[in-house]
Amino acid sequence: MQKARARLLAGVTVGLVAAWSVAAQDATAAQDLKDGPGGEAGAMHLRDAGFMVVGGDVSEPDADGNVTVSNQMHVEFFLPAERRYDVPVVLVHGGGGQAIDWAGTPDGRDGWRDYFVNAGFDVYSVDRPGYGRSPAAPSYGEGTLGQAHSGIIAGLAQSENWPGGEVTPTNEAVIDWLKTSQTTPYAGNEIAAKDISLLLDEIGPAILISHSAGGRSTYMAADMNPENVVGIIAFEASGSNPIADEEMRAHLTWEPALPADYAPAGTEACPAQAERTPSTLPNLSGIPIVLVASGIFVTKEQLDCNAAALQQAGAEVMAHHMPDEGFPGVGHFMMAETNNAETAQFFIDRAAELAQAD
């Protein structure tokens, strides 16, 4: 493993406002800085903060003796001065996103990261390889740039709590969220999973909190390194019905192994295994998995289906439908919505339950 580390701000008190990380609205950021440190989540009192780089494949020297590096992953960490939990959380962003998805909202408020730190969790936020501060390489994907547009964000952001009112492609907060969306190609879930596993080797047992397209690499990392995963909180995460997902069928450890031409049973709406001969996921069976659905992007029916598929494979699953938890109208980007402090507390409570059960 190639690893570099930088340590910053050791043993100091830092007030970090969301705009420092998101830089989405200059006017809001400037006002936040005038208002002083702390923001909505309060000042963060840290014993350390900084970054590390995990993974990275070094090429053979070229004719001039030079090498290149690919497949590395940037990880940012914030460690509270008063740690209340022995188990850290690792935040894994979704597709087209990056670590700062957790750092703030498009209208300049504090993000879930700050709330987790102030709740007493050590927090590690990853940029999956090719996203954010994890550099891209010509070998990723097809080596070509892509460009997201605001319609994609607006479609995913549908909720009753999105900043700025009606969620449309011209909504200012939609456009500000788009500003942090990625254009570089992704290295792929298998590479991301290997790097997340290397991070776990570095920091020890942790809770993985995964959003959206970050799910597959999270489940794969847990399968690679189950002894270092205390629990998974899968927030509308891909791969949560592993039998319906070709990549999960191919890359997770199944007993007995699934044939290459495996076809799920069940219904089209809810693929499953044949009840009499289910294969299990032995590396995930000892890891509590918390599934969370907004009810908009992932419906109650889909949530129940995903939970049943994981349980059929031997996993311990707890499923939470946010409207039933007192959060009607939240959406796929609830970490960015106007009630993100309340939803952050819901996720903090789930993480605390996992940490205390360890």
Image (cartoon, rainbow, N blue to C red):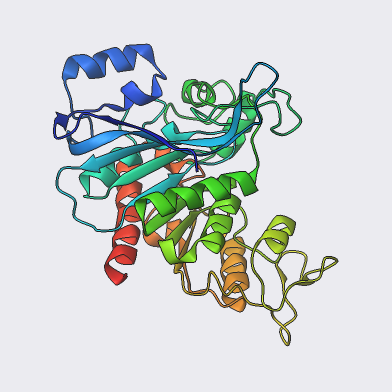
Q: Residue drawn at (48%, 40%), measured in percent from left and top?
A: 333
Q: Residue drawn at (22%, 37%), measured in percent from left and top?
A: 48
Using the image, determine if residue 173 lies above or below residue 199: above
Residue 16, image quadrant = top left
Considering every residue shown, the one lying at the far bottom of the view is 276
Give the image location of residue 267, x and y in percent: 76, 70
Q: Quadrant of the C terminus?
A: bottom left
Using the image, determine if residue 189 lies above or below residue 260: above
Residue 271 in view in this figure: yes
Considering every residue shown, the one lying at the far right of the view is 261
Give the image location of residue 100, x and y in percent: 42, 32
Q: Nearer the viewer, residue 98 or 325?
A: 98
Give the image location of residue 235, x and y in percent: 49, 52
Using the image, determine if residue 276 lies above or below residue 76: below
Residue 337 in view in this figure: no
Using the image, determine if residue 305 lies above or below residue 88: below
Q: Nearer the viewer, residue 168 or 183?
A: 183
Q: Is residue 338 left or right of residue 45?
A: right
Q: Is residue 188 left or right of residue 303?
A: right
Residue 137, image quadrant = top right
Q: How many marks?
A: 0
Give the image location of residue 319, x and y in percent: 48, 66
Q: Nearer the viewer, residue 112 or 52?
A: 52
Q: Nearer the viewer, residue 46 or 62?
A: 62
Q: Is residue 340 left or right of residue 254?
A: left
Q: Residue drawn at (21%, 29%), measured in percent from left and top?
A: 9
Q: Residue drawn at (54%, 55%), measured in percent from left and top?
A: 221
Residue 239, image quadrant = bottom right
